[in-house]
């Protein structure tokens, strides 16, 4: 009895589609419901970020970095500023370092909440999305309190930050953390251990560790495959070595190691770790200090180049900056983690069904702004 | 600048050239500190012999600027290993910041870099294209090893007229997309790439935007591309 | 039943036409018109309820207005009216390459499938439009008409996504009718009649006589039935045919305006009917839980409606809580889990009745 081959259907998911995370087009070849090949097509959100950088001074680049990964803008700022400061060998005051870490960790929680909520929405669970967004609003309120903006901050400057923490920020932050920790349990009850959710995500889109490293996948996606690699510990920058926290890796809790559930679960664990770091940072932060004291009058890094990486919610964000001694960079290359995460989709999604593709895409947590720049 | 300040700076520069950066970093006064650093940079530049587009400040890892002895610096160490294994592949002198290679047998070198147990560079961190002027384009690879935790930077310079570099997308799979993007922005052709097309720009776009002499095309499918922003404010 | 009483009453009113065919037709049309209004009002109320229930479950307020005359009425009562008016005045877009006749026909077929089943639903002791002696079989049979409509909609849109939705839905509805039907057989075994009123008669006498509490197998049968009809009405967790995040809109992607609202009208009508069947079969229909009290005709309507409304609330509750199942997992559950359990139920009920009477 031979196998009947029907005609393969070529389908287009996107660019406008409710669950592609931005304008992404997926060319899909399917045989009935089973996908045989999937090709992502990107470039719909290309805004020539790197070309712009060659015409602006170093501090004028910072708002542009915000807009690349717009869901974790603080992390982008942080990455860029750390790279420029390393190039210039500029040391920032301790209070600034603490503020940066606090903002970066709050941003990590906010970004992960959004990623998890939207993932649930893709799977069909409408309610956890709204609960997570409600809690994310409180974080955005804290950001608004500090620098006036809710999404795109332009907060971290070369040598400091733009505004000092307002009065009452530390109390508000502690209140938020006390309110937020039990909420994580609620999310776990509602979504993480829900049988239907597990059936939709466990054993699907398994990413082996060596394939992940070869494709340059990093961050929670890599850690979910069992690789213990976190830039905050392995390649420490800023003052992360002063805090105690664990690196969360996936362990195949509900299925194979490296499946979609693991990627979801690692993000949930990272939120808990960020809460830990935040508590320590808020307690240890020096109360007084001038955040503008190390701002250089003119940012003129010496001639040279540097590649430096930081850990954003999506993975390692790398900035390759080449300077020729003038106030305007010669070349700024932003190596975004979502770019590498999306490149592995073609490898992961062959042989699964249409609903699984949505599931895998959601678990990779991509933001098109970062991929296209 | 007073005489004692000048003397202090000369002393600090001397110490810095020998590799000891702590006295300079310990200066409280920001102005004096930056002056000392500028003087140090100048002195280092003067001491360096002429090379190709190699920068003067070295920065192999994310630590302080302590000048490491030559044999410990990963770029120098591994550059020497590459030269020993593949004669004639180095395109410039060994230095602290990067390894300059010729494009000819890059594919074999890359395969060796990934598989050699003491090196084991299993992750291509970043791939940058660069327009270095003088009609040369460069492709820069930042490699990193997860097991040994060391990293190097490899640069391959090619001329604009014959901008061909062997593709390494079969060795580090992320090279597929990285090289497509570099081709898109710079016009460097990667021989052996299985899916050589533009990444971010439409397929029928003309020109390579990140080159320094790039001129935007006049129209795209009949839509005029505005160059002057008169009237936008 | 209502048609008969109406027929004789109208005959008394207009002696000239007594007993004639025209009078019969009028006597049939009037209740049907009333039922149509019931369906429309049901849709309006349920859309509002769904949005408010969803909102409160998601920690927000839903549609609100600040007073009559201000955009959506107090507490947003007029929201659905506003939605209906908007849909009525929308442009009617039919894709150029779509199969025009089938495209226009599909919503009507679905609606008919939902509407004709309502005439057999008993709302009170004498308030039923058509008391067939095969009532429940009629409802199950006519309810399957809707599948044709969905397939027509998916196919005629000339859109790959709609085709996906239509095919998924066809597979799902047709499969889940089997456990639903087998659970109904359990009821029929106990009541020995297919008539809706007859089934309710069997459960007279208060809450202890309701079939759901009769024996453990009927208890399980209720849950099997309820979940199967969730799948039949395309509600989450089985709403994969209209899975918004995957297929944009599934089989109703290309529909707009009033045609699109027909799909939802029939979905809510379907929900009403299957809740009514569940209330009739398992919860005693229009009988009050305490026999002898609140047992008149008018109260019957109240009890029936409250049982229906609670079941619909549970359906809405499910929608906003659970993620959705993938198509093959759905089919897996139907054929490998529900079908064996339903067969065991039938067997079990038979044995139980044999031994315990």
Image (tube, coloured by chain):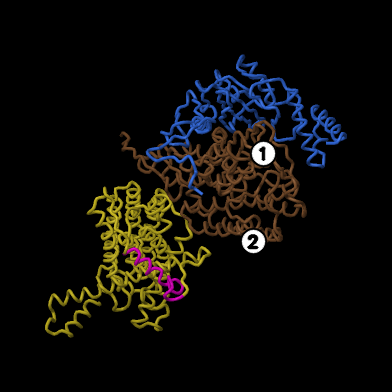
Chain colours: A brown, B blue, C yellow
In-front residue for pair B150/B129: B129
Judged from this view, the residue extending furthest toward the right is B4
Instruction: Locate residue B103, reporting x and y percent.
Output: 55, 20
In the figure, residue C287 lies in which quadrant? bottom left
In the figure, residue C277 lies in which quadrant? bottom left
Q: In the structure shown, which secondary structural element does the residue marked by tag 2 occupy?
A: helix
Q: Is residue B110 magenta?
A: no
Q: In the structure shown, which secondary structural element does the residue marked by tag 1 occupy?
A: helix
Q: How would you rate the neighbour count of disc 2 (Cα within 10 Å): few for under 14, some for 14-19, many for 20 or more?
A: few
Q: Is residue A342 left or right of residue C136?
A: right
Instruction: Locate residue C231, reporting x and y percent.
Output: 38, 57
Res. B173 in view:
no
Instruction: Tell me whether circle 1 and circle 2 mark residues in contact (CB < 8 Å).
Output: no
In-front residue for pair B59/B217: B217
Residue occupying image coordinates x 60% and y 40%: A56
Q: Which residues are magenta?
A: C67-88
Q: Is residue C85 magenta?
A: yes
Q: How would you rate the neighbour count of disc 1 (Cα within 10 Å): few for under 14, some for 14-19, many for 20 or more?
A: many
Residue A84: mark in rendering:
1
Judged from this view, the residue extending furthest toward the front is B230
Which is more foreground, mark 1 or mark 2? 1
In the figure, residue B18 lies in which quadrant? top right
Q: Is residue C234 left or right of residue C28?
A: right
Of the image marks 1 and 2, the number of the one nearer the N terminus: 1
In-front residue for pair C242/C148: C242
Q: Is residue A128 left or right of residue A247?
A: left
Instruction: Locate residue B22, reporting x and y percent.
Output: 81, 35
Instruction: Locate residue C327, reporting x and y percent.
Output: 40, 49
Q: Chain of mark 2?
A: A
Quarter containing the N terminus of chain A: top left
Residue occupying image coordinates x 64% and y 61%: A179
Residue A179: mark in rendering:
2
């Amino acid at each position: 009895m031979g196998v009947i081959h029907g005609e393969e259907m070529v389908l287009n998911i996107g660019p406008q589609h409710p669950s592609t995370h931005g304008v992404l087009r997926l060319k899909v070849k399917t045989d009935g419901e089973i996908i045989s090949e999937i090709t992502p097509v990107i470039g719909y959100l290309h805004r020539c970020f790197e070309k712009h950088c060659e015409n602006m001074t170093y501090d004028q680049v910072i708002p542009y970095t915000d807009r690349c990964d717009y869901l974790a803008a603080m992390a982008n700022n942080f990455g860029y500023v750390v790279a420029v400061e390393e190039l210039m060998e500029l040391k920032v005051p301790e209070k600034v370092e603490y503020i940066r870490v606090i903002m970066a960790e709050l941003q990590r929680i906010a970004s992960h909440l959004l990623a998890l909520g939207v993932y649930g929405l893709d799977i069909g669970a409408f309610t956890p999305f709204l609960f997570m967004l409600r809690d994310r609003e409180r974080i955005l309120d804290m950001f608004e309190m500090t620098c006036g903006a809710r999404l795109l901050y332009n907060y971290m400057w070369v040598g400091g930050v733009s505004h000092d923490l307002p009065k009452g920020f530390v109390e508000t932050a502690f209140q938020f953390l006390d309110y937020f920790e039990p909420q994580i349990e609620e999310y776990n009850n509602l979504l993480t251990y829900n049988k239907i959710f597990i059936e939709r995500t466990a054993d699907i889109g398994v990413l082996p560790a060596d394939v992940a490293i070869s494709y340059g996948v990093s961050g929670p996606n890599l850690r979910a495959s069992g690789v213990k690699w976190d830039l905050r510990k392995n390649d420490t920058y800023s003052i992360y070595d002063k805090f105690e926290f664990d690196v969360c890796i996936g362990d195949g809790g509900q299925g194979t190691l490296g499946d979609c559930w693991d990627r979801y679960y690692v993000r949930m664990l990272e939120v808990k770790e960020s809460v830990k770091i935040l508590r320590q940072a808020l307690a240890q932060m020096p109360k007084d200090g001038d955040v503008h004291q190390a701002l250089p009058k003119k940012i003129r890094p010496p001639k040279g180049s540097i590649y430096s990486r930081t850990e954003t919610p999506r993975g390692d964000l790398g900035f390759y900056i080449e300077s020729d001694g003038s106030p305007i960079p010669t070349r700024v290359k932003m190596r975004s983690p979502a770019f590498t995460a999306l490149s592995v989709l073609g490898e992961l999604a062959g042989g699964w069904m249409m609903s699984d593709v949505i599931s895998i895409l959601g678990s990779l947590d991509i933001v098109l702004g970062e991929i296209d720049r | 600048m007073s005489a004692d300040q000048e003397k202090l700076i000369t002393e600090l520069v001397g110490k810095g050239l020998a590799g000891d950066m702590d006295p300079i970093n310990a200066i409280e006064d920001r102005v004096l500190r930056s002056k000392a650093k500028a003087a140090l940079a100048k002195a280092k530049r003067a001491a360096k012999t002429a090379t190709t587009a190699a920068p003067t400040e070295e920065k192999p890892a994310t630590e302080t600027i302590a000048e490491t002895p030559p044999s410990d610096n990963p770029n120098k160490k591994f550059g020497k290993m590459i030269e020993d294994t593949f004669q004639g592949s180095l395109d410039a002198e060994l230095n602290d910041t990067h390894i300059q290679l010729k494009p000819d047998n890059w594919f074999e070198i890359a395969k060796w870099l990934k598989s050699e147990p003491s090196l084991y560079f299993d992750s291509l961190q970043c791939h940058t294209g660069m327009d270095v002027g003088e009609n040369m384009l460069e492709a820069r690879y930042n490699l990193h090893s997860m097991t040994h935790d060391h990293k190097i930077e490899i640069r391959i310079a090619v001329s604009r007229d014959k901008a061909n570099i062997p593709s390494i997308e079969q060795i580090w799979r992320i090279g597929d997309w990285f090289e497509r993007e570099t081709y898109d922005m710079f016009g460097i052709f990667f021989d052996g790439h299985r899916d050589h097309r533009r990444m971010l720009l439409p397929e029928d776009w003309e020109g390579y935007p990140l080159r320094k002499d790039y001129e935007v095309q006049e129209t795209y499918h009949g839509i005029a591309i505005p160059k002057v922003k008169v009237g936008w404010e | 039943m209502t048609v008969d009483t109406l027929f004789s009453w109208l005959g008394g009113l207009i002696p000239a036409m007594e007993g004639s065919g025209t009078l019969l037709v009028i006597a049939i049309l009037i209740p049907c018109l009333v039922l149509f209004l019931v369906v429309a009002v049901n849709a309006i109320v349920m859309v509002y309820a769904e949005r408010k229930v969803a909102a409160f479950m998601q920690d927000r307020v839903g549609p609100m207005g600040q007073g009559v005359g201000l955009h959506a009425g107090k507490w947003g009562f007029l929201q659905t009216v506003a939605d209906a008016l908007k849909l009525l005045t929308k442009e009617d877009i039919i894709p150029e390459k779509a199969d025009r006749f089938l495209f226009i026909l599909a919503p009507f077929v679905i609606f008919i499938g939902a509407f004709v089943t309502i005439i057999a639903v008993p709302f009170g002791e004498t308030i039923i439009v058509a008391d067939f002696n095969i009532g429940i079989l009629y409802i199950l049979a006519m309810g399957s008409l809707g599948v044709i409509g969905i397939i027509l909609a998916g196919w005629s849109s000339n859109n790959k996504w709609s085709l996906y939705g239509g095919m998924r839905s066809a597979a799902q509805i047709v499969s889940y009718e089997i456990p639903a039907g087998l659970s109904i057989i359990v009821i029929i075994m106990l009541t020995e009649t297919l008539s809706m009123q007859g089934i309710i008669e069997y459960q007279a006498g208060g809450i202890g006589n309701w079939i759901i509490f009769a024996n453990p197998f009927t208890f399980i049968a209720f849950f099997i039935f309820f979940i199967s009809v969730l799948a039949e009405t395309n509600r989450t967790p089985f709403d994969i045919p209209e899975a918004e995040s995957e297929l944009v809109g599934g089989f109703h992607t290309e529909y707009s305006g009033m045609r699109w609202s027909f799909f939802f009208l029939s979905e809510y009508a379907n929900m009403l009917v299957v809740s009514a069947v569940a209330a009739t079969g398992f919860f005693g229909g229009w009988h009050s839980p305490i026999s002898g009290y609140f047992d008149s005709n008018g109260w019957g309507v109240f009890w029936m409606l409250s049982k229906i409304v609670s079941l619909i609330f549970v359906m809405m509750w499910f929608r906003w809580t659970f993620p959705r199942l993938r198509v093959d997992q759905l089919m897996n559950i139907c054929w490998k889990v529900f079908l064996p359990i339903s067969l065991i139920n039938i067997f079990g009920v038979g044995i139980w009745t044999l031994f315990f009477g």
